[in-house]
Each structure stands twice: as C-alpha cells, then as structure tokens.
C-alpha cells in the first residue's frame, strides 16, 4: 500500500514523499511580485464583477461560481510565484556512510524466512547485494560490527552473532568518532533494536542532532512473538557482604504462555543453587520470580539463570541470562552507641560474635562522662567518647543509635550524624528505648530530618508506664523484604512471625514521612490499628531506619520460645548487613555491565571523594586493568563535565576471565585499592528482550532526521541516504509550478466552472 501511495505522490508532485519531507520549499517568482499581486487582485475584481452581473441564479450558485473563479486565479498566481523544492544531495563518491551491523546474540533468533536474523543481514548486506552495490555507487562504505563494543569489519560476512549485548549508544558514538575526520553523509543502523545496555542513548542522540548526522535504521526480526518466555533482566544487589545471602529477582517477559509451567535453574560460582517449578499467572506479560543465592566466598561470581517451559517453545535464545555478584570481604565497621546498658546489648553482640564480616564497636554510657568500649580496634579508639570530627565518624560505615537522648550530643555532632547519612552515604539504624526517638527529643534536631518518621503535634509517651506489648508482623511491603524473610517462602515466613511472642514499645509511633516504607507493624490486640514499628527511607546518599522496639531479647528468652530457636541470632546480623548495603566508599568504581562476552567492552564510572566524602577533583587518578592474558596497563579517563571527581572509562576485553581494576590517587590517604572487577565469559544467550523494538528504531531515525526501513524493503534506502545535509553536498532547485497536480487542479476547476454554467443556462 505504501509503495502505491509513493508512486502516486511521485507522479503528481514529481518527487517522492522522502524528497518532499527532506526538502525546503521556496518561492522564485517568474515575474516581479507586483505583477503577481496585480494578477491576483485583478482576477479577484473580475470575479466579483462577473458574479454580480449574473441574473436568474440563487445566491448559493453565485457564491460557488465565484469561488471557482477565485480558485482558478489563485492557482495561476501560485504558478507565477514559481514554487520550488530545494534538495541537499550528497555528491557521488565524495562522502562516507557508516553501516552499523548488529552482532549480538539476539541476531541468532530464527524468525526470518532466510533462517536467523544474522543470516538475513549477511544475505541482504553481502558485498554483491543490490543495496550494497547501490550505496557503493554513491558513497564510500565503512562497515562496523556492533554489540557490547564497536569495531571495523570488512563486511557482513565477518559477523558471528556472539556479542553479549546490544549497546546502541556505544555503537553510534563509536562509529561517529571513528569517522570524525571523514565527510560523513550519515549512518545506517541494521539491528533488531533490542538494546539491553545501561548506556544513555539520549546523550548520543543529542550529539548526532547537533552535528546534523542522520541515522537511517533498518529493522530486523519479529516485533512480537506469539508464544515465548524470556529473561528480561536478572536483578542482584550491587554487592553483598561475605557470609550473607544475596536476594534478587528474575524479570520474565511472557507471550501466550498463561497457565503453563516453567522450570527455573540458577547456578552461582559453578554450582546449582536454586531449582524451582512455577505455574505462570494468566494475563501477565511481565512477572518476577525470586532469587536466593546462598553465602559465597569473597570475590566476583557469575550467576547464570535459565528458564524453560515444560513443553515446546519456538524461541529459546532469550531463555538464558547471566549476572555478576560481588561478595565483599569484611570486616565492615559499625558504631553502636547506647545511653545505658540494655538487655538487648549482649544478645546483639553474641549474634555477631561469630561473623567475621561484621565489627560492631559499642560505646555504652556507664556514668556521666564515662563509657564502656566494646569491640574497639585499639586502646585509643573512642577514648574520648563519641567522635567529634567528621573524619573520625566517617570511618564507620553504619551507626546503630540506641537509647540515647539527643541532648547528649552537641549541635556539631548532631549535624555530623545527619551528614553521616546524607553526605557520607552511611546507614543508620535507630532503636527504640526510653531515651530514644520522640522520648529522647530527636524531633526537630538535625538528625531528625533524616529519620523516616515525624512527631510534630504528637506528644511523647510517658516512659515505662506507657509501654505497650505488641504482636509484630511484616507489613505488605515487609512480607517480601529479604531481611524479614524468616522462612524459605512467604508461607513459612508468616508462620514464623505468628509464633513469636509479643514485645514492648515505649516510644510514640510517629507518622511515616512521605516516601518512607513501613516494613513491620505492631498490634496491641486483634482488630486494633497497627502501629508502625520498623520504617525506612533513603535520605541523601544513605539510608535511615527506625526499629521502635526496645526488648527484642524476648524473642530469645520468652518461655514460649524453644531454647534452640535461632530467630533473634539470625535477625541481628541480617539487620546490620542490610544497614550496610549500598554504603559508599571514598573511591567508587561502578562497572556496568559487570559481565561481558570476550571482545566486548565494559564501561565504568569513577567517583572520588575526600575524607569528608565531598567530591574530590584534586590529584590525578590512575586506573589500571590487569587482564587474565596480559600485563597491567593504564586505562584512559574522560572527566565528566560539570561533575568534579568523576571520570568515565571503557574496559576492553579479549579473552575469558577476570579483569582486575585498580585505582591509584596522588596525594590521597587511601593508597591503592582494587575497587572493581569485570568478568568476561562466553554466554549461551542474550539477556533482555529479543523482539524487534520498532519504536526505538523509529525514534532514532526521527530524532536524527533519518528514515526507517524493514530489512526486506530497502529499495528507497540509497535515495534516502543521498538526501542529506551532512558531508559534502550540493543543493539543487526543482520547480514545482509544472507539477501535474497543478495542471490537473486547474483543468478540474475550469471543467467544473463550464459544467455548472451550462447546467444553469448561463452560456
């Protein structure tokens, strides 16, 4: 249908729709403008006089005849204005065109009549193909294979379909930069558009728009499968502390498989860690399945996920996905401060005593001006009590704030506590107690703004006399939270919480702030309004949590609890490890993706901070990479504009193995630190969607003033590429006054006028 419309448009207007959309319309009058104006005005006057002299006709008839005469004179006036279409065309053999060929694993999907998408691309873009010959007659062609990296290739025959991902932003930027010194007329992107990289495409589209480089997209593959299940993403924590379980999820994309059964297999560090059979819900196109990775030793580990329908499935290329889990070695230091000895203290310390990844340093006020120090690294640590400098406080990664009143701290220390969360990015866990939270006067303090509850207009409870026993249960959000998962699944977790005895709360509950999440609720009795007892929120770069319970020890010593019950002993390390999650370092190197196929590139963002955890743009950082097959080398850094202390870098890979990254800073007290690793492994499939993303390909073409095509309909591609303002071009003016549509319009108006006059007996 489109080709028929194109042919009709070309016949009537002498130009294709592509030319009309890309050209500039101008007027070049064949006679002076005054003559054109006189013709139009004179014609209008003659029309009015002629219509007024008509007799024996109705007003409607005179109006119609007048309109026809006026239209005739307007068409004649338009022809005298000599409308033209100015087209900018690339000069033959004076320009370069970059052809970007998708070489990711999704190209192995066999949904094309030629077989796989890869075979279709290799056939259509072979050296002797019609489209390559047509483009080669007009341009110098440069071919690139794109996936997780971009590289020059001699042609489509060099494609292997082995890249682990499709990074379209890197592909476009790499080709543009490689051809920066050449007269670049445009780029042709041949892909299924299944971009599963984290690179921001918007930035590259803005760069292409600014340089006027059009990108013409050629789509390959099916836009929607009739029946398929695929892994869209494997979501794991950025890292997990050694000795702890990693909890994540698998995001599945479903097509026509409602009610069918699915097998989920998860391997971590080379061994099977999860095997489940799941019945897929009906009516859902996206669903998640939980992942639980048991404790692994410190290092970087590959996590492989595979899903299989228990039946035939036409597309299996997207059934596998891999991710990386980094396990941090401890110990990580936590500062725990209490205003008085409390029964929970020995239970907390016993729970973490055997955990080599946690070092809890406890400061307990035993008398005014006197403190008991537990778990310190040396005799000088906290000798003067609570830290008085940011540098001293920021050496800890988390703070547990027990039953301590706000007035104990100076105004400077209160600001430091708030900045510990917001600036340093540390974790804060505030416990309940008679001197904590509202009863401790924390509302309205600097730290109060970081806490996830507010007490404005709420009177504090009156000490021990108002303590209430509550039965604690996870909220709706908390029922799926990994810290509160006391059982293997939701059913056993709920049963575990139901059997725990009641504990007391002595603090005014307060209101959760907007954006805060309630994880635990307490009820004084059946049917009573739930009291929020565990609330958390992100604040600045860190996280603040309130656990308003004062005697968790009841979950260990209560007569209803068996002697060998390990609920409390397991809960304290989980809480502390979760409080430590996501805490920033002075040197941060965020690698994304963390897993690539050999030959692909990884990307990373380096962030540097000083001892106060403020952005540090001083000094000259050096990042080196140690590949598994070569000597250590230095990676180039690109400063991020407007972001002091931030640098972007690319990490090339050649063979399978670990690529160890090390950051060195001149003049810094952090010395050398291996802050990240990139893992290169051969992977059986491509993670993320493998359906053709036609909307994304159309958007790339639209934003860059290019055109979109299907791989089986490329007849118009050479002409579309030729119509460009980039490179070495020539402008040509094409007259439109003699277009057939104008002649046909004029004849139609004259015939209509003559016919109506004859019908109405006007001669």
Image (cartoon, grey):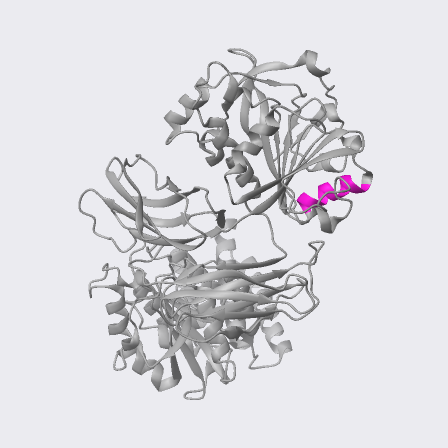
Tell me residue 761's x, y (percent): 41, 57
Residue at image point 73% right, 23% down: 439
Task: Note whether 503 is above or below 108 in the view shown.
Answer: above
Tell me residue 381's x, y (percent): 70, 45
In this view of the protein, can residue 422 be seen by the observer? Answer: yes
Tell me residue 431's x, y (percent): 63, 29
Q: Nearer the viewer, residue 606 or 60?
A: 606
In this view of the protein, can residue 256 be seen by the observer? Answer: no
- Horizontally, residue 219 falls left or right of residue 358, namely left
Q: Nearer the viewer, residue 12 or 175?
A: 175
Q: Quadrant of the N terminus?
A: bottom left
- Horizontally, residue 346 falls left or right of residue 594, namely right
Residue at image point 69% right, 45% down: 420
- Horizontally, residue 5 falls left or right of residue 215, namely left
Q: Name the main secondary structure of what is drawn in magenta.
A: helix
Residue at image point 41% right, 48% down: 296
- Horizontally, residue 551 falls left or right of residue 145, namely right
Give the magenta part as a residue range: 412-422
């Amino acid at each position: 249908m489109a080709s028929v419309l194109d042919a009709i448009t070309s016949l009537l207007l002498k130009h294709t729709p592509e030319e009309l959309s890309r050209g500039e319309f101008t007027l070049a009058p064949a006679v002076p403008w005054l003559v054109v104006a006189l013709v139009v005005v004179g014609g209008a006057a003659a029309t009015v006089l002629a219509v007024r002299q008509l007799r024996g006709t109705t007003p409607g008839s005179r109006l119609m005849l007048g309109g026809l005469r006026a239209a005739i004179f307007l068409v004649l006036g338009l022809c005298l204005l000599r409308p033209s279409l100015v087209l900018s065309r690339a000069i033959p053999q004076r320009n370069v065109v970059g052809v970007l060929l998708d070489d990711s694993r999704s190209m192995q999907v066999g949904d094309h009549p030629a077989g796989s998408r890869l075979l279709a691309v290799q056939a259509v873009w072979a050296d002797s193909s019609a489209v390559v010959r047509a483009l080669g007659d007009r341009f110098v062609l440069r071919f690139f294979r794109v996936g997780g990296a971009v590289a020059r290739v001699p042609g489509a025959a060099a494609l292997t379909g082995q890249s682990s991902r499709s990074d379209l932003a890197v592909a476009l930027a790499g080709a543009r930069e490689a051809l920066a010194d050449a007269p670049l007329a445009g780029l042709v992107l041949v892909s299924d558009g299944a971009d599963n990289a984290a690179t921001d495409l918007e930035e590259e589209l803005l760069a292409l728009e600014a340089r006027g480089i059009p990108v013409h997209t050629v789509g390959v593959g099916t836009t929607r499968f009739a029946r398929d299940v695929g892994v869209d993403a494997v979501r794991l924590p950025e890292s997990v502390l050694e000795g702890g379980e990693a909890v994540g999820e698998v995001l599945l994309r479903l097509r026509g498989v409602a009610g069918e059964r699915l097998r989920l297999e998860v391997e971590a560090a080379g061994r099977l860690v999860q095997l489940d059979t799941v019945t897929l819900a009906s009516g859902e196109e996206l669903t998640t399945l939980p992942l639980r990775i048991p404790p692994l030793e410190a290092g970087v580990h590959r996590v492989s996920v595979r899903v299989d329908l228990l039946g035939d499935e036409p597309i299996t290329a997207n059934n596998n996905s891999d991710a990386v889990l980094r396990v941090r070695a401890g110990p990580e230091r936590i500062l725990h401060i209490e205003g008085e000895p409390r029964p929970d203290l020995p239970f907390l310390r016993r729970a973490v005593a055997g955990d080599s990844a946690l070092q809890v340093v406890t400061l307990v006020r035993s008398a005014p001006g006197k403190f008991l120090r537990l778990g310190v690294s040396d005799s000088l640590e906290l000798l003067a009590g609570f830290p008085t400098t940011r540098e001293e406080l920021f050496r800890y990664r988390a703070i547990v704030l027990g039953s301590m009143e706000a007035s104990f701290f100076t105004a400077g220390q209160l600001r430091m506590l708030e900045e510990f969360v917001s600036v340093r990015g540390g974790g804060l866990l505030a416990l309940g107690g008679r001197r904590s939270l509202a009863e401790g006067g924390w509302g309205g303090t600097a730290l109060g703004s970081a806490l996830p509850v507010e007490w404005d207009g709420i009177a504090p409870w009156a000490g021990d006399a108002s303590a209430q026993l509550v039965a604690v249960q996870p909220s709706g959000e908390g029922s799926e939270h990994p810290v509160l998962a006391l059982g293997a699944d939701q059913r056993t977790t709920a049963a575990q919480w139901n059997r725990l005895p009641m504990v007391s709360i002595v603090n005014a509950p307060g209101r959760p702030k907007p954006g805060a999440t309630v994880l635990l609720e307490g009820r004084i009795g059946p049917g009573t309004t739930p009291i929020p007892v565990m609330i958390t929120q992100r604040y600045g770069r860190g996280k603040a949590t309130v656990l308003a319970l004062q005697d968790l020890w009841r979950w260990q010593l209560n007569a209803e609890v068996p002697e060998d019950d390990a609920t409390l002993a397991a809960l304290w390390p989980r809480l502390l490890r979760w409080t430590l999650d996501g805490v920033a370092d002075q040197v941060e190197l965020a690698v994304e993706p963390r897993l690539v196929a050999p030959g692909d590139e990884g990307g990373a963002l380096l962030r540097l901070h000083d001892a106060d955890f403020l952005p540090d743009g001083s000094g000259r950082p050096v990042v080196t990479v140690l590949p598994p097959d070569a000597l250590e080398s230095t990676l180039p850094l690109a400063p991020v504009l407007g972001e002091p202390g931030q640098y972007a870098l690319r990490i090339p890979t050649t063979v399978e193995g670990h690529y160890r990254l090390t950051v060195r800073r001149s003049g810094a007290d952090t010395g050398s630190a291996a802050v990240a690793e990139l893992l290169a492994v051969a992977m059986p499939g491509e993670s993320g969607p493998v359906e053709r993303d036609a909307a994304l390909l159309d958007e790339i073409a639209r934003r860059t003033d290019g055109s979109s095509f299907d791989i089986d309909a490329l007849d118009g591609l050479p002409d579309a590429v030729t119509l460009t303002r980039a490179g070495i071009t020539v402008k040509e003016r094409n007259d439109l006054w003699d277009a057939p549509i104008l002649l046909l319009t004029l004849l139609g108006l004259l015939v209509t006028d003559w016919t109506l006059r004859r019908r109405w007996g006007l001669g």
